[in-house]
Image (spheres, rainbow, N blue to C red):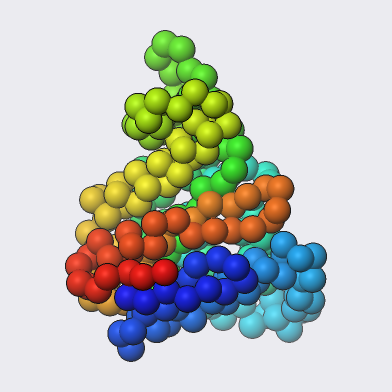
């Protein structure tokens, strides 16, 4: 696997013919993010003809798992229109059986060649987990329990700065979600193994509007056997 840079961020470029579609999808997302960060958004086709066209079916080019945070809207921060991206959103961008089923619908039924796991700066769910004392309660507690391993890993680093600790936990949570998906979704794992799907991890920065990919080498999890290089 090789890497190239689009809009100042690392984007996967895949040498295998099948996975070239994932590279195209990543490029399209990162180009859109560059437009969003610069404030130069494309005009969207929201006319009746477009809506009528979408009643016949959808053909998104990427599936994105991200947080429910109101400041993190993938269609906006990647500057995409109706029908372009298939979104799965839950606080803390964690996954359970329902979220996994939604992801599998996007990557298998809708055939999106790219799955993006998108965390974000200042994630409230991760911050709440960091500040948690005692056992979490209620249904929100189920989310925090999913994030607790990432918080434990971040705290084990020995960092004392609260901002650094939070960002470490956010990024570790994204990595853990990647592992969770690869462990618990045979469909995703098989599609990656067959070269029909790429899974990448990323973080959105609220202040700059930029999305940066994390751990690009993680996409090698299925064993393509190529070394990533920057």
Residue 132 in sight: yes
Q: Residue at x 49, y 60 (%)?
A: 213
Q: Nearer the viewer, residue 223 or 2?
A: 2
Q: Nearer the viewer, residue 123 or 207?
A: 207
Q: Residue at x 65, y 54 (%)?
A: 73
Q: Does 229 sit left or right of 204 as displayed?
A: left
Q: Position of residue 159 (x, y in %)?
A: 45, 27
* Up-down relation of residue 24 to residue 102 (above or below): below
* Up-down relation of residue 213 to residue 40 (above or below): above
Q: Does 36 sit left or right of 136 as displayed?
A: right
Residue 152 in sight: no
Q: Where's the N terminus, which quadrant?
A: bottom left
* Up-down relation of residue 68 to residue 84 (above or below): above
Q: Position of residue 136 (x, y in %)?
A: 44, 18
Q: Position of residue 137 (x, y in %)?
A: 45, 17
Q: How many marks?
A: 0
Q: Residue at x 49, y 23 (%)?
A: 160
- Determine the residue located farthest toward the top in the rendered image: 134
Q: Residue at x 71, y 48 (%)?
A: 207
- Quadrant of residue 68 within the rendered picture: top right
Q: Position of residue 3 (x, y in %)?
A: 42, 74
Q: Where's the C terminus, which quadrant?
A: bottom left
């Amino acid at each position: 696997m090789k890497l190239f840079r689009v809009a100042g961020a690392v984007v996967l470029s895949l040498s295998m013919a099948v996975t070239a579609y994932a590279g195209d999808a990543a490029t399209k997302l990162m180009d859109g993010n560059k437009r969003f960060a610069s404030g130069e958004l494309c005009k969207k086709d929201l006319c009746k003809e477009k809506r009528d066209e979408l009643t016949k079916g959808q053909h998104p080019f990427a599936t994105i798992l991200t947080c429910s945070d109101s400041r993190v809207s993938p269609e906006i921060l990647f500057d995409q229109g109706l029908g372009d991206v298939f979104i799965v959103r839950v606080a803390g961008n964690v996954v359970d059986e329902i979220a996994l089923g939604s992801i599998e619908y996007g990557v298998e039924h809708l055939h999106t060649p790219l799955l993006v796991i998108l965390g974000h700066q200042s994630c409230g769910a991760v911050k709440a987990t960091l500040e948690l004392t005692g056992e979490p309660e209620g249904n929100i507690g189920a989310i925090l329990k999913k994030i607790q391993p990432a918080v434990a890993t971040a705290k084990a680093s020995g960092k004392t700065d609260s901002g650094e600790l939070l960002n470490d936990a956010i990024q570790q949570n994204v990595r853990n979600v990647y592992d969770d998906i690869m462990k618990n979704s045979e469909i995703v794992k098989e599609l990656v193994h067959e070269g029909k799907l790429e899974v990448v991890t990323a973080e959105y920065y609220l202040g700059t509007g930029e999305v940066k990919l994390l751990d690009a080498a993680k996409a090698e999890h299925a064993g393509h056997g190529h070394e990533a290089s920057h």
